[in-house]
Amino acid sequence: MDKLVSHILKNMQTMAHDEVMMGLVALYRRHKEKGFRPDAFRQEAALLSEGESMYAFQLCQVKDTDKKVLHLELLGIILEDDEQSQTIDELEDAPPSKRPRR
């Protein structure tokens, strides 16, 4: 259990110092204050994510209790155009590049 907690803390520290993560947090806060527009949010997140896989998080209060539930969803790589968006499974199924690696 100590290793698990240690690993979680290490990853959280890494996230706290990550520029992409901080940019996405600022984006979320700005949209929360000024009104959430999903299309604009998605486009800005695509620019900030720099081609990395993205996750959606939702923290929900359980009705009539003091408990909360955290929902996670892998969104895959978000590109600016919805038609170009790909999940990791689609990327793994893609044929390998013909260019040899150096």
Image (tube, grey):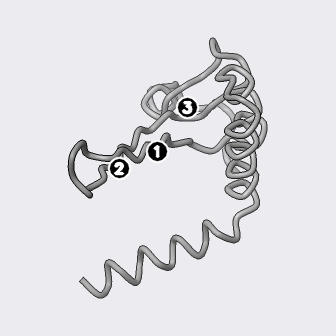
Q: Are marks 2 and 3 in contact (CB under 8 Å)?
A: no
Q: Nearer the viewer, mark 2 or mark 3?
A: 2
Q: Dot 3 corresponds to which residue? A: 96
Residue at (33, 47) in percent of width and height: 61
Work out whether 56 lies above or below 15: above
Q: Are marks 1 and 2 in contact (CB under 8 Å)?
A: yes
Q: Amino acid at mark 1?
A: Phe
Work out whether 73 lies above or below 39: below
Which label number is shown at residue 97?
none
Q: Dot 1 corresponds to which residue? A: 57
Work out whether 84 lies above or below 18: above
Q: Nearer the viewer, residue 37 or 72?
A: 37
Would you call the spot at circle 2 few (<14 residues within 10 Å), some (14-19), or many (20 or more)?
few
> Could you tell me which secondary element the residue under label 3 belongs to?
loop
Q: Amino acid at mark 2?
A: Leu
Residue 84: horizontal and vertical position, in percent? Answer: 65, 17
